[in-house]
């Protein structure tokens, strides 16, 4: 029986890894894409925007034009894990080719990942254990080697890796057997 426990960080922990300008871009892309998304995703984001995004001049932030709600939504994104999950779900859904390519890359590298189409916003957050020897730089390089024709930014690839894998690099995966052997010999 596997007794390993998975620890999660709330979705807004992603902000430690995002530049403010890129965060704003991701929020803008999600808000612009929301009207064309499946009802469950769109309605989830609308409910959260209405609840947590304060747009001057609007009682209901979800009714404000997208350009006016990007900045306050990006600010709320820093503090509200449910909003982060809804935004990232729509952002990833708006980039289906990149999502599939990152998924295929991670599967090829033997990562344990949910199916590409799975709704990760329903998870409690990001798992904290990152596979050993898999830096963002290495993953970006592997992506560009596998897909040289794809013009995706390293920020988009990295964020998609985090979203598809459901992980943030807080702890690096260890080899339990070698660690316990090392402890016994010291």
Image: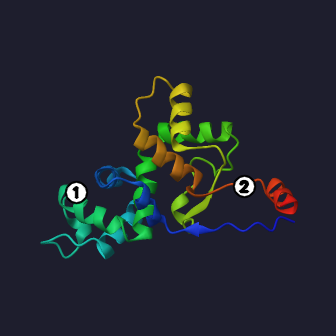
Residue 147 drawn at (x, y percent): 52, 27
How many neighbours does mark 1 have within 10 angstroms: few (below 14), some (14-19), or many (20 or more)? some
Would residue 79 be found to the left or right of residue 54 on screen? right
What mark, if any, has residue 104 been given in the picture? Answer: none
In which quadrant of the rendered view does residue 57 lie? Answer: bottom left
- Say whether residue 81 is visible: yes
> Depth check: 37 or 119 in front?
119
Single out the residue that lies furthest toward the front: 186
The residue nearer to you, when weighing 32 against 83, is 83
Q: Which residue occupies 53% across, 46% down?
A: 161
Do the residues under discs 2 and 1 have CB atoms within 8 angstroms? no
Give the quarter of the image for residue 172.
Answer: bottom right
What's the residue at 50%, 29% (across, down)?
Answer: 144
Element assignment for label 2: loop
Q: In the figure, 77 relative to 95: above or below?
A: below
- Mark earlier in primary sequence (2, 1): 1
Q: Is residue 38 visible?
A: no
Crowding at label 2, few (<14), some or many (≥20) Cα neighbours within 10 Å?
few
**Is 94 placed above or below 170 here?**
above
How far across and how far down the image is residue 110, in percent? 70, 42
Label 1: which secondary element: helix
Q: How is the image coloured?
A: rainbow
Structural distance between the alpha carbons of marks 2 and 1? 44 Å
Q: Position of residue 12 (x, y in %)?
A: 44, 66
Mark 1, residue position: 66
The quadrant of the picture occupied by the N terminus is bottom right
Residue 23 placement, left or right of 186: left
Residue at position x 55%, y 38% in the image: 139
Dot 2 corresponds to which residue?
Answer: 174
The image quadrant where one finds the C terminus is bottom right
157 sits to left or right of 175? left
Q: Position of residue 76 (x, y in %)?
A: 32, 68
């Amino acid at each position: 029986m596997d007794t390993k426990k998975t620890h999660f960080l709330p979705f807004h922990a992603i902000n430690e890894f995002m530049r403010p300008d890129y965060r704003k871009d991701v929020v803008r892309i999600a808000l612009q894409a929301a009207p064309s998304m499946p009802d469950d995703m769109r309605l989830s984001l609308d409910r959260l925007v209405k609840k947590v995004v304060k747009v001057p001049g609007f009682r209901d932030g979800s009714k404000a034009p997208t350009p006016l709600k990007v900045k306050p939504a990006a600010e709320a994104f820093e503090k509200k894990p449910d909003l982060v999950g809804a935004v990232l779900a729509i952002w990833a859904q708006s980039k289906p080719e990149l999502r599939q390519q990152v998924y295929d890359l991670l599967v090829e590298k033997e990562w344990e990942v949910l199916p590409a189409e799975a709704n990760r916003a329903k998870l409690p957050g990001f798992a904290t254990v990152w596979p050993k020897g898999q830096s963002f730089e290495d993953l970006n390089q592997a992506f560009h080697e596998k897909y040289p024709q794809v013009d995706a930014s390293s920020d988009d690839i990295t964020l998609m890796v985090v979203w598809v894998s459901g992980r943030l690099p807080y702890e690096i995966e260890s080899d339990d057997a070698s660690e316990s052997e090392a402890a016994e010999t010291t």
